[in-house]
Amino acid sequence: MTEKIISLARSLWDYHHMNHALKKSAAILVLGSHDTRVAERGAELFLEGWAPLLILSGGLGRLTSGEWTETEADRFAKIALEKGVPSKNILIENKSTNTGENIIFTRALLKEKQLDPENFIVVQKPYMERRSYATFKKQWPSKEFIVTSPQIAFEQYPTDEIPMEKVIQIMTGDLQRIRLYGEKGFQVPQEVPGNVWSAFEKLVAMGFDEQLIKN
């Protein structure tokens, strides 16, 4: 990890953040992830009183399929319960395999439960804030929402399980998906500044291409 790589990666990290301010909402929707700190963030927001309902969404996705034996939502629910969130305030959607399905299947679950929250706090990894925003905006345009993530600085984010190289690999993949999925209509388009796309291209040329969609 050279200073050049870290500098380029930080450009992507900063772009992926939406920098939304928290506001009281009807529900917290935690999107599935391989990072359990996302579940911790959702539970903390509930316990701080930001919303009365905690929805955990995620089956086994791109980064957990073959790695985890239980679904993302079920593992996240255990964390929320351990943090002190009452089970009566938790809803679990554990069939979705991607961000679009997170939203679509959660809509179906809420309809089944005859619930219709008017606004949401959406929780994901720091470097998936923007893609989560763009996907929710496309799949559920009638709802108001803000996006947040674990409040961790870029340099402190990597762990033994999620080392810096893996973080950068996933960030480049997510940036590519922001452009491609916007073009395909899976999410609303997001403008990618020239300096951010240039950093992406340089990182890919350096070998950070493992999570890219290839033809």
Image (tube, grey):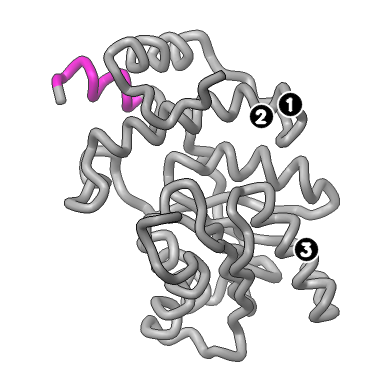
Q: Tell me if 102 is positioned left or right of 31 in this view.
A: right
Where on the picture, by quarter, is residue 131?
top right
- The residue sitting at 80% across, 80% down in the picture is 113
Residue 193 is situated, as x and y percent measured from the top left of the image, at 53, 14
- Tell me, for residue 184, which label it has, or none: 1
Q: Are marks 3 and 2 in contact (CB under 8 Å)?
A: no
Q: Residue at x 70, y 47 (%)?
A: 136
Mark 3 or 1 closer to N-term?
A: 3
Q: Residue furthest left?
A: 2
- In the rendered structure, the answer to whether residue 189 lies left or right of residue 150 reads right
Is 110 on the left-hand or right-hand side of 167?
right
Whether pointer 2 and pointer 1 mark residues with C-beta atoms closer than 8 Å, the reply is yes
Q: How far apart are marks 3 and 2 (CA)?
A: 20 Å
Identify which amino acid the numbered label 1 is placed on: Lys
Question: Of discs 3 and 1, which sits in the foreground?
Answer: 1
Secondary structure state at the residue bearing disc 1: helix
Query: Looking at the image, which is closer to me, 168 or 72?
Result: 72
Return the mark for residue 107.
3
Q: Is mark 3 on a helix, strand or loop?
A: helix
Residue stretch in magenta: 2-10
Instruction: Residue at 60%, 75% (x, y): give it.
Output: 92
Earlier along the polypeptide chain: callout 3 or callout 2? 3
From the viewer's perspective, is 58 left or right of 36?
right
Q: How crowded is mark 3: few (under 14 residues within 10 Å), some or many (20 or more)?
A: some
Residue wearing tag 2? 181
